[in-house]
Image (cartoon, rainbow, N blue to C red):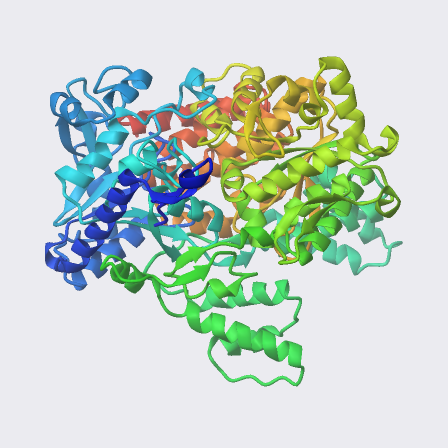
Amino acid sequence: GPLLFGGRGEGAGDERQMRAVPERVEMLAARVARLIALRQTPRAKRRLAIVLFNFPPNGGSVGSAAYLSVYRSLFNTLQALRGAGYEVDLPQSVNDLRSRILDGNATRFGTPANVHCHLPVDDYVRRETWLDEIEAQWGPAPGRQQSDGRSIQVLGTQFGQVFVGIQPAFGYEGDPMRLLFESGFAPTHAFSAFYRYLREDFGAHALLHFGTHGALEFMPGKHTGLSGDCWPDRLIGDLPNFYLYAANNPSEATIAKRRSAATLVSYLTPPVVHAGLYSKLHDLKDSIDQWRALPPSNGEAERLADLIESQAAELDLSAADVGQFDTNTRITGLAESLAELEATLIPQGLHVVGDAMSRNDRLEVLTAMAAVAETPIEPAALSKLVDAVPMKDGRADKADTVSRLADVNRLLSQDHELGALVSALDGNYVRPAPGGDLLQAPEILPTGRNTHAFDPFRLPTTFAIQEGARQADLMLQRFADDGHDLPEAVAFVLWGTDNLKSGGCPISQVLALMGVGARFDTYGRLAGATLIPLSDLGRPRIDVVVTLSGIFRDLLPHQTRLLAEAAYLAAAADEPIERNFIRKHALAHQATHNCDLETAALRVFSNAEGTYGSNVNHLIDGGTWCAEEEIADTYAARKSFAYGRGGEPTQHKELLEDVLANVDFAYQNLESVELGVTTVDHYFDTLGGISRCLERAKGTTVPVYIGDHANGRSRVRTLTEQVALETRTRALNPKWYEGMLEHGYEGVRHIEAHVTNTVGWSATTGQVSPWVYQHLTQTFVLDEVMRERLAALNPAASSRVANRLIEAHERNYWSPDDDVLAALQDAGEQLEDRLEGVEIAA
């Protein structure tokens, strides 16, 4: 738990002496004392608070976490704690646990989960230290969030000495005006009261945030070196904070450490498998294989070709993916599309803490790892390896791969996480481990360790600089293949996680487009930017408008200044503007707006300090927006803070609008195999948000591209292609959705998230093919058996699926036939009735 407690003052002489900050020293001492008390308290007498997340609120998502089967994992954790000596009232089953948390008295109080207790408003007002700040944002106590007007509700259920609480929402969901706030503001009354209840009323010895991730660490305040004026520090106080966190997310994990004093205990992501083919996709492949086996002049070949065309059209594969070419080219293109679908890696199901990976799942993972390593190993040999049968191979490179895979298999065959959690909660040392994706970074194993990330002074790495240049060329080549000239400007979204995992490849892509290199000092530390001569570059310098996630801004300040310096050096270079588009656009802006070159060359945009996200995701999730203009306004309000060479932000909405008017396409890299652009809402929140601003600035739509470098084989796709790929390999794929439905309530929530995120892409870009909604409707709503399964497992999320599809129609993202629309609306009404407890007559 990093805590800054002193430093050197400004000025000269005695003012430069090192000195302590008394308030921070007191916090440091208090945290040490609480850790000592935790260690010295017998397990049977410890009171433990476990926090579950609920985002988005009121959407069947109580107990949400990335990649994690929360309730099964929580049940296993409670079982392990009781076995270790904690006083735990263990539920009879996972279903009983879930019911006690979600149901209980929730219906009586109209809440998404059981109400554990009510905090009287008078008591809250008397004890709330920062009441004035909260009331300035949310009005008089107790506010409207989790309140009955007389008290604040604490949601959760107590199991002996363990309290499982539900973290309150941010509070501004569904409120379009609050989403336009440029800077952070105080948490709600309910949020502040919840954490004080855990610290003081319940008297927790330790706190365990359960899964990736919640809102505490993203509350307003400094990004590092927090003080008593920062909300995460105020809320967590001196309470020992442990955080069960996905091993593949080192960037947000670092924020949890820095901003909420969290000790991390990593958990594994689900196994990845090849998507394969299913149903009519499999039938199409069979027809293509038969066609290939026949002579071209054979009459049967012609009949098969007609059948193939018909099958492809039914699957909406023909026009979108192949185009209008001769028969041989079309069928060959279809075969290539099917091969890509079949070979695409997807996550299967959710991870369960306490359950070791099964043999079949380990075999799938090792197969994928061998493919990523480009080391062919026969399936029979991999099968023996999984069964721990000794293998011998004469080739040294293959022997190394086999040895690594054997180690991975051994580590995956055991659970390392429950024991690590119990040990961490004793106040013991949690050993460190790097974060990353299992396929490319097996050193994350065993999980159950404290994730760390990177050396900030050595990013980008030498390899990343070379690889980033190659990936930038791929991006430009794809744009050219689509019939365009060399772009003058590109809008590029940078996240922290993909840069940490790749050593800074996306940063290097931006530098390569600009024709700029990274400069390092004699110690190998990042020192700044340097221009690559135009003669070496071989093309004009491309202008790049960079938008950073708040996490990138926090974790990579040196790289933020590097990018700003790169843009300035290019703008100030004495080069012809037809060979330097950065200078061309900066000089034009300078002339029009009568500003200095320093301002005209600003190209790095993000949030104001201490705030995160564009809030476009909240706007879409709430469904309260009327026109796409609101999306652009929301994004610009939050993401128009320009970061210059000094690293300090200044809001420049007009400059952002001006530079976006020159942009020819928008681009972002995929982070990992596990994540897709329809998996989480962050992608359309960032890339989608700026795309909507681009359309407003240019008066026309612009191409949106996704760079997929996650599995070792680079590919640049249009957004339309990427959404189609993910829809076919995930949402419509029984291998994916059945894997999700094995986890019941949470699995339905993941299906609903895919549908909502797809709508998000339509709202922000308009580049989702209408057939996507047709097939989602047929699979999850019009199929009565499937609809009943979803409704039985998670009534709220299943109702949202239908409502999202209806919303997509109402916003003209697709136009179903009258009978399909009527059936969808009828099904939606039935799901709504079921959610509200109305009995449906047989």
Q: Residue at x 65, y 39 (%)?
A: 563
In the image, taking residue 678 as reference, residue 74 lies left or right, namely left
In the displayed structure image, the side of residue 288 where residue 443 appears, left or right = left
Where is residue 590? Give x, y as percent.
74, 19
**x%, y% of residue 493?**
61, 36
Q: Position of residue 321 (x, y in %)?
A: 72, 41
Horizontal placement of 306 versus 213: left or right?
Answer: right
Residue 788 image point, x, y percent: 37, 38
Q: Is residue 721 left or right of residue 631?
A: right
Above or below: residue 53 compared with residue 242: above
Q: Residue at the spot x=67%, y=21% of the render? A: 695
Displayed quadrant of residue 440: bottom right
Number of on-image labels = 0
Q: Which residue is nearer to you in this view: 277 or 55?
A: 55
Residue at the spot 79% in from the left edge and 51% down from the top edge: 332
Any part of residue 373 in sight: yes
